[in-house]
Every structure is written in structure tokens, then in C-alpha cells.
Image (cartoon, rainbow, N blue to C red):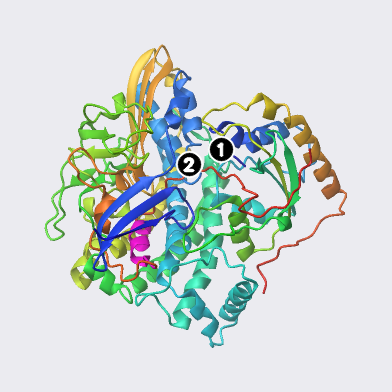
Amino acid sequence: MGNLLLSDEGVGVHVAQRLMEIDFPPEVEVVDGGTDGFGLINVFLRADRLILIDAIKGGEEPGSIYLFELDECRPFPDDYKTSLHQISILEVINLSGLIGPLPRITIIGVEPKSIQMGMELSPEIESKIPRVIQLVKEEVQAALSGSDRGSLHDMSQP
Amino acid sequence: MGKRITIDPVTRIEGHLKIEIEIENGKVKDAWSSGTMARGFEALLLGRDPRDASYVTSRFCGVCFSVHQMASARALDAAFGAKVPWGGTLLRNLVMGAEYIYDHMVHFYHLSALDYLDIMAIAKYTGKDPELNKVRDKIVSLIQRGDTFPLTPRYEPDEFCVKDPDVVISAVKHYLDALQMQIKAKNMGVIFGGRAPHYQSIVVGGVTMFPDINQVARFHSMLDELATFVNEVYIPDVISFGMGPLLPLARAGLGGGHQNYLCCGAFEMDEVGSKLLFQPGVIVGLNPVEIKIKPFNPQKITESVHSSWYKKESKPKHPYDGTQVFDLERKDAYTFVKAPRYNNLPMEVGPLARAFVDKDATLLGLVKDYGVKSGVVARHAARAIETKKIVDAMYYWCDELTAAMVKPGFKIHDTEHWDPPAEGEGTGFFEPPRGCLGHWIRIKDKKIANYQAIVPSTWNASPRDERGIRGQYEESLIGVPVPDPENPINVVRVIRSFDPCLACAIHLIDPKTNGVRKFLVE
């Protein structure tokens, strides 16, 4: 996921582009999700297992890498009152859950340095891409070995 | 001085719009519409190969990306002197048509409908329908878990909200069905769009996806399914709400605004482009009984930065000459959105503008038979009516494509004009779901020398201009009843009826507000 026009915000798309060059087994699909919201419901629902790569604002040093399960992340801001908020990827996931079983979702994030307009990554972020790719490969390996399959977030059933 | 309140953001799902209103005696006295995020992606294009424009601009927005690709390709077509063959035009139309169905359905069910429903009434459904009982149990269990996004949060239901459990539950069922349907519409677009998200097939001179007959058949059968939903669910829902419980709002003309309308025209219906599905035209001060259409002349478009955080200019500029130099110190500015004007007048763009400019018989029928006035309800109705128009046209384009494909010399692209000219300029107009979109390109030394886009929401969300004339959102809010300042549901209804989209899609997950615990890898 990410916006290619906002420098490090697009790190997910840059990673996806590199992943597309890797010879994964046929059951692995790499999707450049870009900035699409609703369009990704489709992708989320057809996956047995999902690894989402995005820029994450976690307050650590730029280039820090985060890895967590969707479970560990709450979609609602704490100070939520009457205002309505824009869709985030977490909300798209919730929306998908209304109509179908969701796969287990792991989020791999990179702390951006710059989210200014620009189509290149900052050098600090660029240098972390090999490590992100390695993490993705490890997750894929674990998924393919069959040990972590299954639906954990089936909100489509009462 | 009345009481001032701010609604930020306004969009249910796609954001960056702030509305400030002043209330006096329970009504909106004045309003300010503010885009709170800087755009100006155009700057990224300067010095690039012009052909990059359709790819780069398709990343402008997370919601309406393909339409930028389209407008950009049309600007390039003009600048390169490319002549898109009929096959290319048909494929472009089909991809955009799929986008319309998706966009309008999502707008009604997922972004707007909940402003007109008391969702909690669902728990009181006592009917026997097993499907609806399943829906009720699902929603109730979500409510009990406190996990109800996107069905909540919401404003407090007022007297216009539907509270009948039978109606509410069937609407929520349709909300869920529409989620499935929008997936189908997206999948349909991908057939000729090449990939998703961010279709890639639309380029200068035509398209890059050569169709085969199986793809057309697949497209056709998906269209059948969507057509059934549009005709049997979407349109009946909009009409039964609009001409039922919302009729008082429809008759009051809530959210009508300036009543100036602009459509730049779109969707060729023949090879020479002499007939369009949406006719271009301009209406100044609508009189629904006798609609007067003026011809659309792009030279009359200017953009003012009078109220926007850009360097002050002596007078409004034509988009070819437009610049984006930010000036955040200006005290008299309140938005990043510029103020486009046509012949110095603010315009509404979008489905209602297209319908009035087209003198659409179905919409004018609602005006005549039910006394519906221009405004919120008419806007939703125009959107639904237009979806059917698009669906019908898509069948025609499918037939035309099937016929064209078997003819010798069938082409989808003008390969003669693939190389950029040394110098040139071109304008690309299109009518995306949200209204008139224009891209302007100037080429020097085979590179992009200037690029400007005026997007639909810029027209509608524009601020005041030099003459102090409000933009269409602002004007539409004047006089809107707000009996309770804590619950400005009518204000939200008005703004949402335009289908605002100022999202340039920064979608960082913020672990602070989203409550992520620490998961640092390194």
C-alpha cells in the first residue's frame, strides 16, 4: 500500500515492485495496492493469508521496521466523538469483514523519513528494503508450510 | 454574530474536507469550505516525458485514479495530435463505465445512506425472512461488540431518518449486497483496465489492452448482474427514499445552492464523436420549466487564488498559465482549494449538472410530478438515474466493440502518434462520476513544461472569489436548518450529496491513535 507521489509514503509500493521480480510459487500473489481503498476489499477477501506492507507512523527513528498482527491494532482513534473520519486501510479491512471471512493479516511497516511530494525514497528508507523483503519471505515461507493458515477475523458470521 | 461550528472531516470515508458554519436562529447564516491538504502533485510532472503523465496522474487520488488517467490521455491526445480509433474509444468508455457503476453505488450505500437511517432500528426487526434475520443478528452482534465501523459513528437520527425496522433492515441488506456488487464492478473494469488497483491500459492514442472475444463475453455477463442490481435495487431504493420519507427535504430544495451547472461533455457514442452520452453545456440560474443551455467554452475557465493559500495573483488565471506557489502566511486565505470560475461564475459539476444540461426526462419528471427542487435529494436521484444511463450505454459499447473486432484493420491505438511533439499544448476534458475534470498540458523540448488539473471537487468545494461570491458547497449551506448545533446532520447531508472527494490519500497507519502496541522489529 502507499502513495507513490509522496516519497516514503510509497514504500509499500516500492517493495511490491521489487517483490514482483522474485520468483514466488504460483499461490503467492503480489499486489501493488496503491492508494485504493474500496478496490482492495476484493484482494482481502480472496486471500488465504495476507501480508500488508505500508508506511507506519510509530514515532521511532526513520527506517524502523514494525511487524505486527492486525489483532494487535485497533481501528478506532481513542478520542472519537461525532466527527466522521476518512477511510484508512484498517477500515477497509473491517468493511471486508462484513461480507466475508478475512484471512490472517500481518502488517509490516516502515517508519518514513519524508512524506513530502516526490517519487523517490529517502536513502535511509531505501536501504531498509532488502530487510523488509527478507521479512516478507520469512512470512511467506511460514504461510506456505501450512502452519499458520486460517481465518481469525470472520465478522461475516454472527 | 451567530454560533460557529466546525465539521472536520465531513466525508464518511474519503476525507480532508473541513466545513465551518455560522448558525443563527437555527439556520446556517454563513459557511466556509476548506480543503485542508495541499495538492499540487502537478509539480512532479514538470520536466518528465509527457507520456508519463497518464501513469503519474492516476496516482493523484486513491478513489478516482482511473479518471485522471483518462483526462490525462485526452490532454495528450490533443497535444500529440493523436486520433484514437473507435476500438480504443470503446474500450476507454467501457473501463470508465465500470468506474461509474462502482462509484455511484458506493456513494449511495456506503457513504450516504446512513445519514437517512436509524441503524439501531434494525434490532427491532421481527419478520420471518431468514436472510434478513441473519443480517439483523450480524449487525446486532457487531453493536454488542462495540465494533460497528463503518455503520457507525453517525449523527443522531432526526425526524427525516427512516426508523421502520422493516425498511431499515432491507436497506442494510442492500448495503451489504452493494459491497459485493462493487467488487464485481471493479473486476469488470480490470478486464480492459489491465490491472487493479490503478488501471494502466489508457494511454495517449488509445488503450494498450487488445481485447479478445472471451473477455467481451465475460464483461457482458458481469454487466448483466450489475444492471439487475442497478435496476431492481439501487434505483428503487433511491426513489422510494427520496419520494417517500425524504420528500419534504426534496420539496424544500435543501442544499440547492447557486443553481449554476456545468458539464464539459463525455462518452462518444459514435466514431466521429458527433454524439455524446453526456452533452456539454452550461446553465446559469436554473429554471427547471424552461432550461436554457449555453455552449461550453473552455476558454472561459479561470482559477482564482483569492481565498487560497497560494501566492496572490493580480487576476485569476487560465489553467494553462496556472502555478502552485504556496503562501501559508496569508491571513485572508482559508483553504488549499482554488476557486475555478466559468465566465466569473461558480458552477456545480456532477450528476445533477449533467442531468439538467441533458434535460433528462426522468429527473425532470420527478421535478414535475413530485415538486422536487434542485438540492440534496435531486442530486442522489440524478446519480441513480445516470447509473442506468451508463449501464444502457455500456451494452451499446459492448455490441459496437464486438462488431468492430471482427472487421479487418481493427485498431485500439494510434501508433503513428506515440512520440511526443517537440512543442505543443493540449486540453483533456472528461466527466468522471463527480463531475467536470480538466487536465492542461504544455510541452516544450518533448518534455512537460506545465501541467494543471482542475478536479470536480475543486469546482464544488471552491472558496470565495475576488467578488466575494461563495463556492457551491458554501452557497448550498445557506439557510439549511440546524436545530441542534451538536447534531448538524443536515449540513452533512448537503455536503455528502455532492460526493466530495478531496482525498489525495495519505493513509498512514498511526499507531498512537490507532492504539498499536510496540512491535518494533529493528
- Residue B64: give its label: none
Residue nearest the viewer, comparing A139 with B76: A139
* Gap between marks 1 and 2 measured at Cα: 9 Å
Work out whether A127 lies above or below B255: above
Residue A78 image position (x, y, % from top left): 59, 59
Q: Can residue B443 be seen in this view?
A: yes
The boundaries of the magenta stretch are B487-497
Per the image, label 2 sits on a secondary structure element best described as: loop
Name the image quarter holding residue B69: top left
Residue A100 image position (x, y, % from top left): 65, 63
Instruction: Specify few, some or many for label 2: CA neighbours under 10 Å numbering under 14, 14-19, or 20 or more.
Output: many
What residue is drawn where x is 67% and y is 24%? A123
Residue assigned mark 2: B504
Residue nearest the viewer, comparing B76 with A76: A76
Residue assigned mark 1: A3
Per the image, label 1 sits on a secondary structure element best described as: loop
Residue A120 image position (x, y, % from top left): 59, 26
Please report, as a chain letter, where disc 1 is located: A
What residue is drawn where x is 56% and y is 79%? B132
The amino acid marked with disc number 1 is Asn
Q: Are marks 1 and 2 on the same chain?
A: no
What residue is drawn where x is 63% and y is 32%? A113
Residue nearest the viewer, comparing B218 with B336: B336
Please report, as a chain letter, where disc 2 is located: B
Q: Where the C terminus of chain B falls, by quadrant? A: top right
